[in-house]
Amino acid sequence: MVKKWRIVTFFVIVLALAGVISQTVMNTAKGINLGLDLQGGFEILYEVSPAEEGEELTDETMQATVSALNQRVNVLGVSEPNISIEGENRIRVQLAGVEDQQTARDLLATEADLSFRDVDDKERLSGDALEENGASVGFTRANEPIVTLSLKDPNEFGEVTENIISEYNQPNNRLVIWLDYEEGDSFSEEVQKEDPKYLSAPMVNQPLYERDIQIEGDFEIQEAEFLAEVLNSGSLPVEMEEIYSNAVGASLGEEAMDNTIFAGFIGIAMILAYMMVYYRFMGVIAAVTLSAYIYIVLLIFNWMEGVLTLPGIAALILGVGMAVDANIITYERVKEEIRSGKTILSAFKAGSRRSLSTILDANITTILAAGVLFYYGTSSVQGFAVMLIVSILTSFLTAVYGSRLLLGLWVSSRIFNKKPRVFGVKEKEIHES
């Protein structure tokens, strides 16, 4: 007797699943963060060395550098930056969606070491005297941009200005403001240049016991904002040298994503067509579970706030192939049991039981390989590994248990009793035991 309620349950599950996917899949896909290879941006690999000769690079120093770089990236308004330590003395910075790459480079590379010096280049006050987030942009009465600094101790700055007045006569009574002063830099040389390296060199005519001071330097508004943001982000505890960079234009990334997704659709369509032709009704079940599989993988990746890259899309499509492989193993076992003369229900139960250990072994070895890639890989390799692991774990939910649930409803309804052709088995292939 046909148990129709099982067939009704099947259609209720499928329709509910189709309704949820159709209503939420676009929002889920749009919510996934795209890597720089998909939306444009760039990555830079820096080699790090101690700021002072004789110092050693420690884990704490490297972590402090990453934190400082993160603060600077926030100035750019970049979402989901990827800043990672590689080896003992390298830091990789990946910024997706950055339009002005040169500004980003300048912001990352500068040490942001502010210092106040006399005309003989002797340091009188360091950037440590600046309050946290104490730099801001203002305007003079002539509407010229300036940078305003808030100091921790006005008395300290007042003593510096008083010493300048007592030690130097005009026109050498200057307080020279430097950003990233290097050994060998000289005010006497820079002052003769049209574009000097120092920021400003105002004359000090009276002691200034003030908390707020101003830097005037013929700034454009963008230059003043950039300087204030760099100072607020803090100085780097190390020196960094760029040894590799890779830039991807937004249009190139969009084209690559479109081509990859198009190729993925073709590949998945061919897989589903093959399954339905060769496995008949079981192939239809596979098409349903694979659709759910892709949706769930995207949902999990969105929930993880992962960054999707081209290798990640490749891992998703590879995961489809592995999920299909799990279905094929199960369906072949079922067909073998049908050919041995068992009933459809008995063949389904025995085939499902026999296939589980094979599927488990195959997926565990792949997860181990993906784990090694994630641990030792960098940037896009790690993205590939994460997507592959998520895909494999999700395939257990859909290709194994989901497929068995949906196929089991039809088999248990007994509607397919004595209809082996529905499962791709001809009557002449059945050998009665």
Image (cartoon, rainbow, N blue to C red):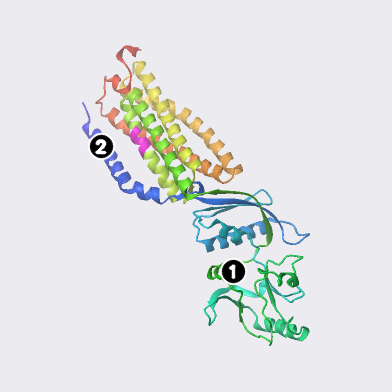
Residue 106 position (above or below residue 132):
above
SS at badge 2: helix
Residue 432 visible in the displayed image: no
Residue 10 position (above or below residue 88):
above
Q: Which residue has dot 2 on it?
A: 11
Residue 55's mark?
none
Rendered residue at 71%/81% (across/down)? 160
Where are the magenta residues, as a range? 287-291
- Say which quarter of the image contains residue 7: top left
Q: Position of residue 243 (x, y in %)?
A: 66, 50
In depth, the one of 122 and 270 nearer the eye is 122
User: Residue 290 colored magenta?
Assistant: yes
In depth, the one of 306 and 222 nearer the eye is 222
Residue 7 visible in the displayed image: yes
In depth, the one of 362 and 307 nearer the eye is 307
Identity, as a three-letter code, of the amino acid under mark 2: Phe
SS at badge 1: helix
Q: Relative to 47, is 304 on the left or the right?
A: left
Rendered residue at 32%/23% (across/down)? 423
Classify the position of the C terminus by image quarter: top left
- Say which quarter of the image contains residue 207: bottom right
User: Residue 161 colored magenta?
Assistant: no
Q: Position of residue 256 (x, y in %)?
A: 46, 42
Magenta stretch, main secondary structure, is helix
Rendered residue at 38%/42% (across/down)? 295
C-alpha distance separating marks 1 and 2: 63 Å
Q: Residues within 10 Å of mark 2 (few under 14, many from 20)?
A: few
Q: Position of residue 218 (x, y in %)?
A: 59, 74
Identity, as a three-letter code, of the amino acid under mark 1: Leu
Rendered residue at 40%/47% (across/down)? 299
Q: Relative to 71, is 196 on the left or the right?
A: right
Q: Relative to 275, is 194 on the left or the right?
A: right
